[in-house]
Image: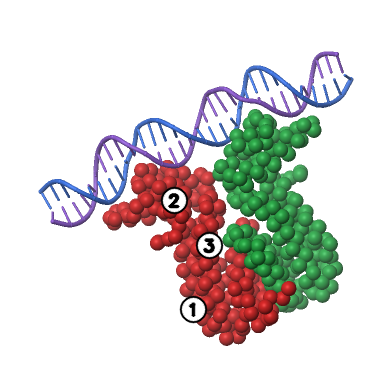
Chain colours: A red, B green, C purple, D blue
Amino acid sequence: MPSNAPMHLTPRKRPRQARAAATVDAIFEATIQVLVADGPDRLTTTRVAERAGVSVGTMYQYFPHKQALFYAVNERYLSALAERVEGAARAQHGAPVSEMVKAIVTTYWTVKTERPEVTRALYRSVVELDNESLIEAFAQRVDTATAAMLATAPDAAFADLRTVNLTLLTTIFGAVRSVFERDLPPLEAHAVQHQLILMCVAYLAAVKSAPRKAS
Amino acid sequence: MPSNAPMHLTPRKRPRQARAAATVDAIFEATIQVLVADGPDRLTTTRVAERAGVSVGTMYQYFPHKQALFYAVNERYLSALAERVEGAARAQHGAPVSEMVKAIVTTYWTVKTERPEVTRALYRSVVELDNESLIEAFAQRVDTATAAMLATAPDAAFADLRTVNLTLLTTIFGAVRSVFERDLPPLEAHAVQHQLILMCVAYLAAVKSAPRKAS
DNA sequence: CCAAAAACTGAGGAGTTCTTTATATCTTGA
DNA sequence: TCAAGATATAAAGAACTCCTCAGTTTTTGG
């Protein structure tokens, strides 16, 4: 909730009464629903308000403008996602790398797949705004968590942990996104998930204790 | 150019005179420029026309509506991209898998990086429309090309070539996209590119001649 | 050279969308 | 209980946007 978001995107005021908190929640929920049902460019303030069962004016009491709403929704989502991955990473401290990889891939994949339409809708919506800080913050959190995890691996050490970790995450995030974009049928998606784990494990085995980074 | 695009997205008429061809080109170019400069949701018919140095009416002579224009631009781009990758794949028939991987990754990465702002702009814009058929067609082309390539590898055979190929491409496409999304600095981006090749090679080594697909 | 075909123009109608604001209603704490 | 603060409302203005069409200009082929 407390965020280093660009100021122009921060909420206008916070709900103080219970009623207001419920309203804000309803607005968030409505935003996602509209996003899922109508797509990012049919998301209008009126539509969201209507769906949330409040008037437009109410929305503008909490969010200075549409973008801020968008931003807040994505922030929430990414924050929850980061939390899950952080948890998974923490749970694997000291485990063999193959277990680590498996856990991270599975967790990330699972979260993204739990509500596929939402995932898809948000993948599409992050585009609409200056998402740099959002992505950055998310990446930072996960980066840190998995780097710390990898450092505790008993069966491998990495000369350039930072790069290895970055590559791993880039690949995992990207692969999942690709699968969504191509809208692969569950069977193939699942197969890819499995192969992705193999791939990451093979990669880590190949680079572990390797000199710097071979040119 | 002849495409199996949804009919409602097909061009209205084709240019017959040289002048008209130039106009259409200018419109394409302008679309990309506006996309780069102003982003997808500030892309308006007026703005594009203005930038292209033609009147709005002219645009509507060739494209039935904005979406069709969008679609055409992306189709062009993806088609060119597919062509490059196909070429690279063809050139590697019979080469060792490590060379194959290197060539594909490098080619794809290079094309995407040649004009980074354009790449970024289009990554953002594909979202705006029913891009399924677009992505599908692109993926299909590349899939076919790389599968054919991999089948000729002298130093490896794959029990489930289809899945391996799919995984490979999903990963490569995704990783590149991720790098753009995170806006990694050139140094890190380059490092990841290198690592990605290692990763793919390690993966192929791990699964080659393997039984079916290990559960 | 000239008529027919092709290409181009751009003002403006019809419809949206964002956001403000004056007003009304609800909650809370003393 | 009741005033003050917190919330909610909905009408409406200003600003855009998409797309059309009646009319003009350019190109082409004979």
Residue A20 seen in the figure? yes
Callouts 2 and 3 on one subunit: yes
- Residue B140: x, y in percent? 72, 56
Image quadrant in which you'd find residue B186? bottom right
User: In the current view of this chain or complex, which residue is farthest to the bottom?
Assistant: A154
Rounded to the nearest angstrom, the CA distance separating label 2 from label 3 is 18 Å
Q: Is A10 drawn above or below residue A190 in the view shown?
A: above
The CA distance from mark 1 to mark 2 is 37 Å
Mark 1 falls within which chain?
A: A
Q: Position of residue A20 (x, y in %)?
A: 31, 53
Mark 1 = which residue? A91
The answer to which quarter of the image holds residue A188 is: bottom right
User: Is disc 2 placed on a helix, strand or loop?
Assistant: helix
Distance between the alpha carbons at the discs numbered 3 and 1? 24 Å
Q: Please, what is the three-letter code of the amino acid marked with disc 3?
A: Glu
The tag earlier along the polypeptide, 1 or 2, is 2
Viewer-nearest of discs 1 and 2? 2
Instruction: Please tell me whether mark 1 sits on a helix, a strand or a loop.
Output: helix
Residue with the mark numbered 3 = A136
Looking at the picture, how far across and down is residue A129, in whole percent?
Answer: 52, 51
Classify D1 as above or below B86.
above
- Viewer-side residue, D5 vs B145: D5
A106 or A6: nearer the eye?
A6
Q: Position of residue A161 (x, y in %)?
A: 60, 76
Looking at the image, residue C24 lies above or below residue A77: above
| Badge 2 density bin: few <14, some 14–19, many ≥20, Cα 10 Å | few
At label 1, which amino acid type do we have?
Ala
Chain to which the residue tagged by mark 2 belongs:
A
Asked whether the residues under marks 1 and 2 belong to the same chain, the reply is yes
Total of numbered circles in the picture?
Answer: 3
- Tell me the residue that label 2 is attached to: A8
Note whether residue B12 is visible: no
